[in-house]
Image: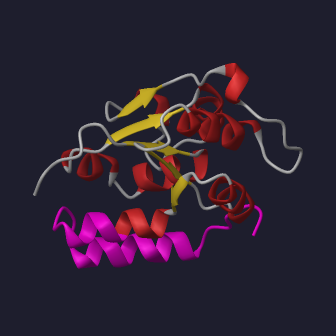
Amino acid sequence: MKRLKRALLVLDASCVIMLDRIECLEALKGLGAQIAVTPDVLEESSLQKDPDGEFVKDHPAIQIRSPDEQLILPDETLGRGELESMALCREDSDWRVFVTDDSRAKRKANAEGLLTLDSRAVLWTICVSQSISFHDFRRGMRYLGGQSSGAN
């Protein structure tokens, strides 16, 4: 399998927290994926701890990248983290994928022609690559089933 070294997955807060909580960030990085969060997503996710009490910001698989401020488009229906993440994707839309479970953010990003995935798609990709077991996939899906995704 050819690794995608140029592709960058830009995760929003709920996705990075979920993937970290079910211990899949390392597996995703092991597939050759670059993973990034914006400063606002970092702040949002740092306020939430994983079950062991560790902050997400200390994770070695995650890059912190600031978007070009001119690419952050105002939208009162979305949070700053989603807006920053979409701006970061706009910088190189051929190679960046916005990963969000927020349906409003996904619709807006898709309308702009940005590539999007949700946590379930990322989790399934990790599973079919045999980086996690089907049992771990099911555990992650159960975890996702118990989470609200903000605005749907």
Q: Position of residue 35 (x, y in %)?
A: 38, 39
Q: Identify the residue at image location x=26%, y=44%.
A: 29
Total marks shown come to 0
Q: Establish if 70 lies above or below 19.
A: above
| 62 with respect to 16 (left or right) | left
Which image quarter: residue 100? bottom right
The colour scheme is secondary structure
| 79 with respect to 89 (left or right) | right
| 140 with respect to 129 (left or right) | right
Numbered range of the magenta stretch: 124-152
Which image quarter: residue 86? top right
The C terminus - image quarter? bottom right
Q: Establish if 50 lies above or below 74.
A: below
Is residue 125 inside the magenta stretch?
yes
| 38 with respect to 54 (left or right) | right
Q: Establish if 5 lies above or below 18.
A: above
Q: Identify the residue at image location x=48%, y=29%.
A: 57
Evaluate whether residue 149 shows in this view.
Answer: yes
Is residue 148 inside the magenta stretch?
yes
Q: Identify the residue at image location x=38%, y=58%.
A: 22
Evaluate whether residue 47 shows in this view.
Answer: no
Q: Position of residue 111 (x, y in %)?
A: 69, 59
Q: Report the residue that reaches farthest toward the left.
A: 1
The N terminus - image quarter? bottom left
Name the one closer to the observer, 37 or 143.
37
Q: Position of residue 76 (x, y in %)?
A: 89, 44
Q: Position of residue 50 (x, y in %)?
A: 49, 46
Q: Identify the residue at image location x=42%, y=54%.
A: 19
Q: Report the residue that reaches farthest toward the right.
A: 76
Name the one closer to the observer, 146 or 15.
15
